[in-house]
Amino acid sequence: MLFESVTFGVNEGDKIGVIAKNGTGKSTLLRLLSGVESPDSGNVVFRNDLRVGFLDQEPSFTPGATLMEEMLPALREEDHEEWNREDRVVQMLSQLGLPDPSLKVDHLSGGQRKRASLARVLLSQPDLLILDEPTNHLDISTVEWLENYLTRQRVTLLMVTHDRYFLDRVCNKIIEIDMRQIFTYEGNFDYSLRRRAERIEALTGELAKMKNTLRKEQEWMRRQPQARAGKARYRINAFYDLKQKASVRYDEKNIDPSEVKSSYIGSKIFEAEGITKRFGDKVILDDFTYTFARYEKVGIVGENGVGKSTFIKMLQGIVPQDSGEWNVGETVRFGYYSQDGLDLPEGKKVIDAITDITEDVVVNGTTHYTPMQFLTRFLFSPADQQKYISTLSGGEKRRLHLAAVLITRPNFLILDEPTNDLDIMTLAILEEYLKEFKGCVIVISHDRFFLDSIVDHLFVMEGNGVIKDFPGNYTDYREFIKEQKAAQLKESAAKTDAPRRENRERPQKLSFKERKEYEALSVEIEELTDEKTRLEALFNSGENIPDIADKAMRYNEVKELLDDKELRWLELDERS
């Protein structure tokens, strides 16, 4: 059972993030709310005429359709009347890294399918937007675009994501699934963490009190067998109720790789000398040279398609370079966590997959584990270990992949998008492990919090073979980019403003049209001055003036016209 008698509401304007450990029902909850699945009991009630948009982890498309054909039906009929509907689709697809709308959906990769599905649901502009892991398979710049888009939009949002910066900046409410219940925190992710810690502390204290009371009641029950009838019956019933409540176990079960130590790594790690790689006209690396240092932790960032995954496959010899050489130290032992997942038969059991790698796991040089004992540290119970890999959830497969990588005690970890499908609790523990890891780490990730927590510097792949080494984490890099852009804008504005200032300092001569206006103003001012003088003489004559009101109104009009025309004449006279 995933949930039991849970009740909560979503109000208009809420932007809610759902957090929980893997396997506790986050995706199931979203599918129930979107109507894809039905609850065993209870109801999901929507406001009348509510438009719901759902981003599933496994999107489906019309076979043979192009991206454009798949997107257009998602647009509201009344929307975008003044803007071409196809232009709207092209813009959204481009923002999500899909610039070719004629591409057939049958030819999309897994990541492209996820981005196309996201484009489709955003184009539909629903009243309630339900997103299941929207940041998976997006590069960082696209994640930041989506973050800004959802922050600006006046849409009600419910989503599951492991991206903590995304949760913190977009959401105003957090829902946690725990112990088959739902806990709601009014505030962003950072606030929810503090409230969650308080809740766990209070719960732990309450359970301790219950167990202490239970011990006293057990003693009473043993001493008073005759009290099982009559007026003490209420106390006996209360005892069994207390016993049931006190039997609840609350513990923060998480993966525990802390004892898995890396093997020794020598002073020589490896060197890259003049590495070049091309695929046709596309340049991945161009004369790349670098010497990796002991215990170095580097993040790789760049747009989708610049070759990040190719780069790390090349340094392991999985993909050959066109020219140049990798010189790898003798003690280096790579551990590769691939974005593609484990290359294991789907029909193999979990325990067999790990036993095939090794039957004796040495975790810290002295402690030995069997594969079964080792897997329990990655939250695979004995029953879970007998499951076939094909039946595992995405998060379970990721945990198995991580266990399979660490079991060999690598001293150079290469991680390609390790955060996909891992829950936030697991990510936090993995981050702590990597910070203390006595070896080298290269990580490709779109999770900005993960990068900030681990890396010392970044390889920024800008495309066309260009790699820049930035000395800092991802937040440092973004601040640097912002400062650069601000400086460029300031410089550009100064260059643009210089001719304007010069023009203001050196007034231009009158144009032909302005010269004509200047000459006409002299005549008009003279005529208005004469009219004003005549009206003043009439008002001072003492004669009876039948249309005095009209004359007074005209006098005020003449004065205003005269002021305006004299001011304009002075402006033109300065340049004549």
Image (cartoon, grey):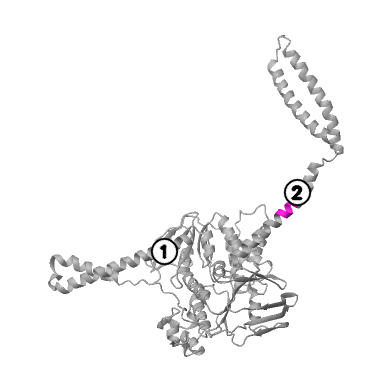
Residue type at mark 2 is Asp
Residue lying at the far right of the rendered structure? 512
Q: Are there few (<14), some (14-19), or many (20+) residues within 10 Å of tag 2?
A: few
Residue 86, percent across and down?
A: 67, 60
Tell me where the magenta segment starts and ends, as one range: 490-494
Residue 334: x, y in percent?
58, 83
Say which of 491 and 567 sits in front. Answer: 491
Q: Disc 1 on helix, strand or loop?
A: helix
Pointer 1 with pointer 2, Cβ within 8 A: no
Q: Main secondary structure of the magenta part?
A: helix
Residue in the picture at 62% in, 85% down: 329
Residue 300 found in image quarter: bottom right
Mark 2, secondary structure of its residue: helix
Which residue corresponds to mark 2?
497
Residue found 51% across the figure and 61% down from its top: 168
The three-letter code of the residue at mark 1 reads: Arg
Of mark 1 and mark 2, the one earlier in the sequence is 1
Residue behind mark 1 = 196
Residue nearest the observer in this picture, 474 or 2: 474
Residue at x 46% of width, y 68% of height? 26
Image coordinates of residue 387 in percent, x first then y, are 45, 83
- In depth, the one of 383 and 355 nearer the eye is 355
Visible residue check, residue 210: yes
| 244 lies left or right of 253 | left
Horizontal side of residue 556 vs 135, given as left or right = right
